[in-house]
Amino acid sequence: MKPRDRILSRLRHGRAASPAAPYPAPQAQATADSAPDIDAMVTALQAAHAEVFRMDESAWPDHLASLAEQRAWQQWWVGRDEVASTWQAHGSAPSVTVFEDWERQKSTLFESAPIGLSLAQGGIADTGTLIVESGSAVPRTLSLVPPVHVVVVRENSLFPDMATAMVHYSRHGMPTNLIFISGPSKTADIQQTMAYGAHGPRELIVYLCR
Amino acid sequence: MSGFTNHPDQDFGVRIHDALGDAELRESFHGAMTFLRDRRRAQFPDPEALETLRDSGAAIRDRALAQLPDLLEQLEDRCRHNGIQVHWAETAEDANRIITGLIRAVNGKRIVKGKSMATEEIGLNTALEAAGFTCLESDMGEYIVQQAHETPSHIIMPAIHRNKASIARQFAEQIPDTPYTEDVDELIGTGRRVLRRAFAEADVGISGVNFAVAETGTLCLVENEGNGRMSTTVPDTHIAVMGLEKVIEKLADLPDLMRLLPKSATGQAITTYVNMISGPRRDDESDGPRQVHLVLLDNGRSRIYADRQLRATLRCIRCGACMNHCPVYERLGGHAYGTVYPGPIGQVVMPQLFGLDHAGKLTQACSLNGACGEVCPVRIPLPDLIRRLRHEGVSTDPASPVRGHGRQRRFSEALIWRVWCFIHTRPPLYRLVTRVATRARHWLPPLPRAWTRHRAPLQPADRSFQEMMRHREDRRS
Amino acid sequence: MPGYCMNSPAIQRVYLFGTCLIDVFHPAAGLASVQLLEREGIEVVFPEEQTCCGQPPYNSGYDEEARAVARQVVRRFSESIPVIVPSGSCAGMLRQHYPSLLADGPLADAARDLAARTYELHEFLHRVLQVRWQDHGDPVKIVMHTSCSARREMGVREDGLALLRQLEGVEVCEPESAETCCGFGGTFAVKMSEISAAMATDKCRAVQATGADQLLSSDCGCLLNIDGMLRKQGAHLPAEHLAEFLWKRTGGDTP
């Protein structure tokens, strides 16, 4: 017998030898078919140390341009999503690198990519979470490696809570890599003192767009 | 240096003594545990809602365990369909052999690891070293601990026994061009710098798994630092190691578990990152691992599974709340246990994995105060399980399901309880004994030194309560 | 949970399970328990054929010895009236553990029945009898230690405190980290004496830091532990069982 079969047979035998009624599930709470609570999303993201701006979708490029000027952000890395083309068309950024060839650009990304800009495919309002799906348009590492991550998310793509998000993915299937992001990277591993930018972005800037 | 052992009972008393005598350690743990308990409490303001949520957590985990073999087959099937290769390991040695083989097969040179208790359990780092590989821990706490040749002292916060001054010294000594600083941001910045290089160059990433969803063949990994994302995204090969009990039935089971895990663990509403990995990179994707492997680890779990009561052990979601609330753990710290899993869950898991002959004494380091059971997000009846393992430790029943049963039985103690029982099942004899104890209270031999070293001797009253009641009856009639 | 309604007029008689620690070390607390109940017009039945609840061997893993004692308790307290226990941990043994301990024998039903009518004394006084008391003592500040079993297994922390709060002259406080175990744990105090002592030391410090004049608890085990250490340290903080204190404060003659 292979290890697999031995393990499974032990488990089946163990279960048959001492059957037990599973712990009873509590009565399911009525799932409110409520709209996503945008204010809760903003509060949760801010509590997690993210910066949040709410505006019409047409307004974010101008806003980001002035923010970039204030903070002297010059080197932008983007993928090939809508947000990337809008930002390139806006023309305010001195340098925009399209991240498309991982093998070639990987070391530059790690060494000298200060800011990543991307579109989040969705979000979860009550926990202040951005949903990033893997796909052909944007490399996964764009939202991870640069110290600053600017992300645009549309209010109409938000789920009210994780349960509704899971219903969606159960129905439509999972992407190979699905990431929930709820703030900048952080750690409290040294004497319970919170520090941001452990391995991922130090700063997370969110544009919540109508 | 502290280390894990397969014989945690050995020198347990010495480790306890040393830990209790280490004022700095006690201070570290007291501060950290108070911090974690306060944070958890703040996340669950409504006690009734918490109890309902714990019911749900227990039910979800129990439902998964009730179907465990079937869900594992489904998980394997879905993972294969998604392009994840599944391996089954019966023992720690098997798991290490499988992982080493996988690394050799891709000619792996540089290995990074995200935080994973399963790989601690199998002693993967040591096995990899023996095979000629070095594996860099990438969780900040694990990195600190690995660099100091220590083992984690807590399952969620591995370096919780260390203060920032000692970490500052370590970094200044061991990392080139690093000045001494106690500024935590700078210390983390140093770790980030070193580990960034390692991530960029790594060809194999190893991680644990918090939950595996059978419905979709998805591996879930929760973390705050981003090292989990790095380890599972940047290297070409990702190897995930998971205790086989961590499978859940469906995606719909995740939300409640996610509402319990980070809040119970560190008092966070949600972790910064939730990774859900359902396969290697597709052809049209530009990054992500080309190979994803899942190693399913038994290592004694199927034996635990075979007992109706002890099966609840496998509900555990490794949040660490039991140790954060354990007054014994708070005073000893994690290393004194000498085990990968310390605290109450360790006292339940370890004797079952290693046998009561090697780890049965661990179950004695518990006052049965119930704090662990009260906070467990999946309602593992930890005090009941500890008591049960004490029973198995002294049980002479050959049918006992726990390895090493009966090996904690001492003739003298068994005799004491025999005599005790003889007296207490014979009320007249009991009355005689209490009469003697009360009358001769000034001449009684002193109690065990273990009691009187720290406390005044116990002194019986001059008359027993039963005697008082008899007098009272007599006066009335 | 026990099945008696609040202020149930049906209750005229109750059993008292005295506990072995009260029997030998704090008999006055046992007597006070009887008197507190009798003052409410309740007849207290005290079966002479009682010893211990069986918890010490049970917690040490000696189930057979514990079972022998438990069977005796179930048989002696068979009349269908409440069983009052002036101790959280012994009450917890009867209510929470007898049913599983005796589940496989002929007394399974009887054990469940006993569990359902077992009360911790102060729970019974407060929730079922809903006593109302007048305070007769001088102003005093007390620190209340609720045992882990009273708090967690029995859920009766509030009952002890609520009774104390009825007493005008009594300032009630709890030590810092009140929910933390005092380190007694029965045989734990002897088997793991160093850890136990470390826990007791912290508890003593917290208790003393309140500046209270007196320490109260409704569990004798904790009292012996904390008071034993305080006395060894030469501290002047008299310890008393809650029942005894309540009886004296509410006009009972000194037992």
Image: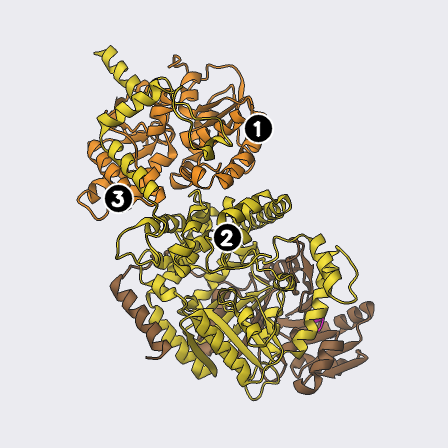
Chain colours: A brown, B yellow, C orange
Front residue of B234/B181: it is: B181
Q: Residue furthest bottom?
A: B283
Residue C144: percent from left, percent from top: 49, 29
Residue A130: percent from left, percent from top: 60, 69
- What is the chain letter for disc 1? C
Which range of residues does the magenta coloring cover? A145-149
Residue position marked by numbered label 2 in the rendering: B337
The local secondary structure at tag 1 comes to helix
For the C terminus of chain B, give its image quadrant: top left
Q: Amino acid at mark 1?
A: Gln
Distance in Å between CA atoms under marks 3 and 2: 29 Å
**Dominant SS type (magenta):** loop
Q: Is residue A148 magenta?
A: yes
Is C68 rendered above or below residue B227?
A: above
Q: Is residue B45 visible?
A: no
For the N terminus of chain B, give its image quadrant: bottom right
Residue position marked by numbered label 3 in the rendering: C64
Q: Residue C208 bears which disc, if any?
A: 1
Q: Amino acid at mark 3?
A: Glu
Instruction: Decide if residue B5 is on the left or right side of residue B114.
Output: left
The local secondary structure at tag 3 comes to helix
Q: Is residue B313 magenta?
A: no
Query: Are dots 3 and 2 on a single chain?
Result: no
Q: Amino acid at mark 2?
A: Tyr
Front residue of C244/A36: it is: C244
